[in-house]
Amino acid sequence: MNDVLDCCGLECPAPVLRVRDALTGTALSQIVVTVDNEAARQNVSRFLEHQNYQVHTAVQDGLFLITGSRDGVVTTESVCVADPVGVYPEYSGRKIMVLVTSAHMGRGDDDLGDMLMFNFIKTLQEMGPELWRVAFVNSGVSFVAGDSEAVPLLQELVASGVQIRACGACLAYFHLLETLQVGEITNMLEIVTGMKLADTVVTV
């Protein structure tokens, strides 16, 4: 494929949606995408990897040039909208997704809310193997970046097989993109798809 799919200037999740649409119904062994920010680079790269592409990224004129290539072709049937579900390969039971939407829990005193949310994250492991994914959006992304005390707790969850996802647009908004410590950058398409795939969604 010689044409370049220009996704510069697009807000999340538009870059991933455009790439998905470009692959759907088309037989492509290669796709080239340009994006202008790190969050989009990671989201598009990971999406292509989940479509079994080999991904290479170069920087050209201040933009990220993402090339996805693979042997054979990609067909409509092989294109999905999010990453595979298999978090616990040995576990095929219920899947719980937790959506953390704020750095605080509840309304009222923010200091108390901070303590409550931290304690909630600390207790997540009690959900056991049913806990599938924890996604952080808005100010909730502060838990996965910088010197947050929640980082070691979340790293333990990752080690046990739980997926940790952080909204790329939110990280960029709070200037935390470069300090992400645990988990992977995600976008709204993957968050919505995850909510559909989960048996239960807990929002805090």
Image: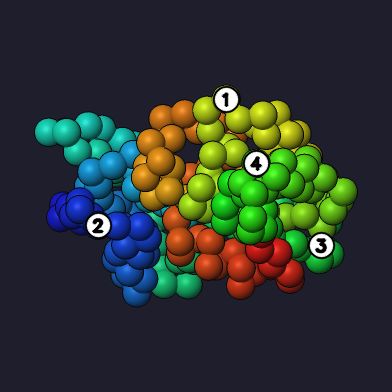
- In this image, 116 relative to 146: left or right? right
Compared across the picture, whether 123 is left or right of 16 comes to right
Would residue 28 appear left or right of 139 to someone viewing this image? Answer: left
Residue beneath disc 1: 147
Position of residue 178 relative to residue 157, above or below, is above
The mark nearer the N terminus, 2 or 4, is 2
Q: Nearer the viewer, mark 1 or mark 4?
A: 4
Q: Which badge, 1 or 2, comes first in the chain's sequence? A: 2
Check disc 3 and report the residue beneath it: 92
The numbered mark, 3 or 4, whose residue comes first in the sequence reads 3
Secondary structure of residue under mark 2: loop
Label 1 Cα neighbours within 10 Å, binned few <14 / some 14-19 / many ≥20:
few
Tag 2 residue: 10
- Helix, strand or loop status at disc 3: loop
- Dot 1 falls on a residue whose secondary structure is loop
Task: Please tell me whether mark 4 sits on a helix, a strand or a loop.
Answer: helix
Q: CA distance from mark 1 to mark 2?
A: 30 Å
Place of residue 161 in the rendered image (x, y in percent of width and height, measured from the top left): 74, 43
* Quarter of the figure with the N terminus: bottom left
Residue mark closest to the camera, 3 vs 4:
4
Total count of labels: 4
